[in-house]
């Protein structure tokens, strides 16, 4: 018997069709993508606060370093440093790139106040044609009066390659590790470094943060986009969603 052309297509009901392996995969993926997305949002907020602190403190007048309480948050505090540099013991912080060119940041310990020591970042110098050729470091006077700001470097930065052997001075180091510096110098250092605002012969175009807040937001959007993809994959693989939507569309065209 020929079906009547006036009969409407059968309406399918939405049903779950569990796929255990894909369900577990999607659930684990959702935990990963949502966690990473919210972590990126938190990082963006931290970077906004950091940039705001830098902008606010960069407008303040410099204060004498010996008056600064190192136990408080002194990041980006502008300071005036008057002291005696240890010209015989300088470090070359390796793997610092400026404008696509590899180089070093030059760190020198300076005695200030009542026999206290701080490590000063004089700025960036380009690397020679090969690693065995160290750059010519501009000389230092016996006494310095510098302006700069306090900066706390990460204690454990990524190490690119083996640590250079300790032979003579200046010494090449892979990471700005205060414990390492104190061990090699044999003296305690302020928990902050000083970045000079102006240093003849050096590049002092300091970067406040490697990733701006907008880039963290962009990464968060990508992670949440993957979250949406996993949700859709979970629905499609564990139900008759596609057939149900096709049936609804066909009925809508009747």
Image (spheres, grey):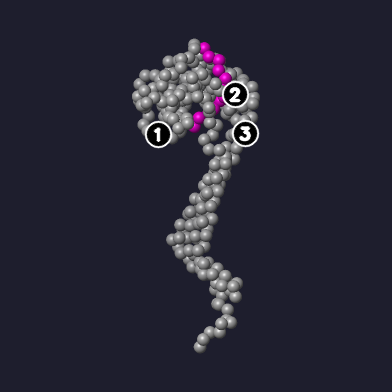
Q: Classify 245 as above or below 53.
A: below
Label 3's element?
helix
Give the prevailing secondary structure in the magenta stretch: strand
Looking at the image, the residue that sits furthest to the top is: 142
Q: Where residue 50 is drawn, which disc sits there?
A: none
Image quadrant in which the C terminus is located: bottom right
Q: CA distance from mark 1 to mark 3?
A: 31 Å
Q: Position of residue 245 (x, y in %)?
A: 55, 68
**Badge 2, how many Cα within 10 Å: few under 14, some, many 20+?**
many
For the image shown, how many numbered marks are present on the structure? 3
Q: Position of residue 83 (x, y in %)?
A: 53, 14
Q: Where residue 160 is drawn, which disc sits there?
A: 1
Which label's residue is closer to the chain start, 1 or 2?
2
Which label's residue is closer to the chain start, 3 or 2?
3
Label pair 1/2, CB-CB below 8 angstroms: no
Q: Nearer the viewer, residue 183 or 124?
A: 124
Q: Which residue is mark 2?
A: 78
Which label's residue is closer to the chain start, 1 or 3?
3
Q: CA distance from mark 1 to mark 2?
A: 31 Å
Label pair 1/3, CB-CB below 8 angstroms: no
Q: Position of residue 61 (x, y in %)?
A: 64, 22
Residue at 51% x, 86% y: name it: 2
Residue at 51% x, 18% y: name it: 200
Q: Which residue is mark 3?
A: 52
Residue at 50% x, 17% y: name it: 110
Q: Nearer the viewer, residue 61 or 112?
A: 61
Q: Classify 78 as above or below 51.
A: above
Q: Residue 55's image quarter?
A: top right
Q: CA distance from mark 3 to mark 2?
A: 15 Å
The question of residue 149 being in magenta is answered with yes
Residue range in magenta is: 143-154
């Amino acid at each position: 018997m020929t079906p009547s052309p006036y009969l409407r297509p059968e309406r399918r009901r939405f049903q779950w069709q569990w796929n255990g392996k894909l369900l577990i995969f999607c659930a684990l993926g959702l935990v990963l993508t949502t966690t990473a997305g919210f972590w990126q949002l938190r990082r963006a907020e931290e970077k906004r606060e950091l940039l705001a602190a830098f902008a606010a403190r960069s407008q303040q007048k410099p204060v004498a370093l010996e008056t600064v309480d190192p136990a408080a948050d002194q990041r980006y505090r502008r300071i005036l440093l008057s002291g005696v540099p240890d010209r015989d013991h300088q470090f070359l912080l390796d793997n610092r790139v400026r404008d696509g060119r590899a180089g070093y940041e030059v760190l020198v310990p300076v005695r200030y106040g009542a026999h206290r020591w701080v490590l000063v970042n004089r700025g960036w110098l380009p690397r020679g044609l090969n690693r065995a050729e160290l750059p010519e470091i501009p000389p230092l006077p016996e006494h310095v009066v510098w302006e700069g700001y306090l900066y706390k470097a990460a204690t454990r930065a990524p190490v690119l390659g083996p640590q250079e052997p300790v032979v003579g001075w200046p010494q090449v180091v892979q990471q700005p590790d205060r414990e390492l510096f104190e061990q090699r110098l044999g003296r305690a250092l302020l928990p902050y470094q000083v970045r000079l605002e102006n240093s003849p012969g050096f590049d002092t175009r300091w970067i406040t943060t490697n990733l701006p807040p907008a880039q963290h937001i962009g990464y968060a959007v990508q992670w949440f986009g993957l979250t949406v993809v996993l949700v859709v994959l979970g629905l499609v693989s564990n139900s008759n969603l596609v057939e149900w939507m096709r049936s609804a569309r066909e009925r809508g065209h009747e």
